[in-house]
Structure formats: C-alpha cells, structure tokens
Image (cartoon, rainbow, N blue to C red):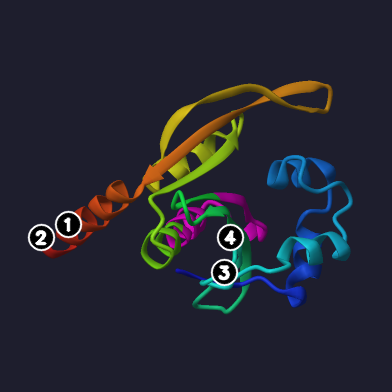
Amino acid sequence: MIELKPFGKEDFAQLMEWLNDETLLVNWSGNLFSYPLTEASLEWYIEDTNDLENSEAFVYKAVETDTGKTIGHISLGGISRKNRAGRISRVLIGDQAARGKGYCCQMVKATAKIGFELLHLHRISLGVYDYNKSAIQCYQKAGFSIEGVYRDVLWFNDQWHSLVEMSMLENEWFEKQNNETANIIAQ
C-alpha cells in the first residue's frame, strides 16, 4: 500500500537521482523541464502547491506504508475550480524495486480520490505517450477511459511521439467506488 504525502524540498535530491537521464525526464515531464533537472526548477514546480483552498496544483510523493520508503511521485495540476477540472501528470515509480507491484495504480487512484472527493472536481484528465503500454493499462485499471490521440506532439531522439488522452468523470469515479465496495461486501 502507498500513502501520498506533499512533495517538498527535502524530496528534491531523490527525484533528481531517479530522473538521471534525459529520456526518463522527458517521459516524466514532457517539455516542462529541461535536462538536467535542477533544484531551482523544482522550487518553481512546488511554488504555491498543496493548499486545498487556493492551489491550482498538488504535488505528492508516494510512500510505501510498510517501509516508510518513498517510491514514487505524482501531481494533480491545471486545477480549474470554475470548470471543476484537473489533470494528473508527472507519474513516476522511481524506485526500480517497486515497479510492477501495482503501486502506480494505487497512486493514480489516491490522486483521483483527492480530486473527486476533496476538491469536488467533475473531470480529471491525463496524457501518456503511446509507447508506454504499461502506463495506459494502469490508468485504465484505475478507471480512466481513452478519449483520443494527439498525433506527433513530441519530437525527441529524432522521432515523433503521440499522446494518448484519457479522462474520468466524477460519476464514473463514484460508480467505481460503489462497485468495489459492493464486491468486497459480496465476498
């Protein structure tokens, strides 16, 4: 199991260690950051975040509850309170030993829970590069639906990459929670 905790300056070194090559950084952030990742850019990234009443972005580290070890990173940004919308981004299981154990899906679900249940969002979207099949499957398992593909949005390593757009609406979230609760009760 994981728990999301606010990402702060004390977490910069770990994230910079995980994102130690340009390909990893681009997979994580698209064009938001340039390589190498710096403390100054991370300070900008967390500025004015994680205030439930006022922030337009929430940035988290994922902590494994059994060990207390930080294993990943995720954010919920682009918050439009008027349109009750947000966007999950910068999803990373940085700890190699934690990959393939379902933590990513837990992180996405925990972030969606914050968006739908604490921030009362109506829609949460995300984008994932089309070659990242395991991430697409993770997001679908968490309840996100594919809406479409933005073709050739990123030029990197002398080739084009497309972006798969996915989303979930609040009624889909709450229906999924009710179904999961009903399945637990039925067992």
Q: Where 167 falls versus 159 (above or below)?
A: below
Residue 158 rendering spot, x and y as whole percentages = 84, 22
Of the numbered discs 3 and 2, the one sitting upstream in the chain is: 3
Residue 125 rendering spot, x and y as whole percentages = 49, 43
Front position in the image: 44 or 53: 53
Residue drawn at point x = 27 percent, y = 55 percent: 174
- Label 4 sits on a secondary structure element that is helix
Spatial CA distance of label 4 from label 3 is 33 Å
**Which segment is the magenta one?**
88-111
| Residue occupied by mark 4 | 98
Say few, some or many: other residues with alpha carbon within 10 Å of mark 4 (under 14 / 14 to 19 / 20 or more): some
- Check disc 2 and give the amino acid type: Ala
Of the numbered discs 4 and 3, the one sitting upstream in the chain is: 3
- Label 2 sits on a secondary structure element that is helix
Image marks 2 and 4: residues in contact by CB distance under 8 Å? no
Q: Nearer the viewer, mark 4 or mark 3?
A: 3
| Residue occupied by mark 3 | 54
- Label 3 sits on a secondary structure element that is loop
- Check disc 4 and give the amino acid type: Ala
- Label 1 sits on a secondary structure element that is helix
The image's mark for residue 186 is 2
Spatial CA distance of label 4 from label 1 is 27 Å
Of the numbered discs 2 and 4, the one sitting upstream in the chain is: 4
Say few, some or many: other residues with alpha carbon within 10 Å of mark 2 (under 14 / 14 to 19 / 20 or more): few
Residue 184 rendering spot, x and y as whole percentages = 18, 62
Q: Nearer the viewer, mark 2 or mark 4?
A: 2
Q: Which quadrant holds the N terminus?
A: bottom left
Of the numbered discs 3 and 1, the one sitting upstream in the chain is: 3
Q: Nearer the viewer, mark 3 or mark 2?
A: 3
Spatial CA distance of label 2 from label 1 is 5 Å
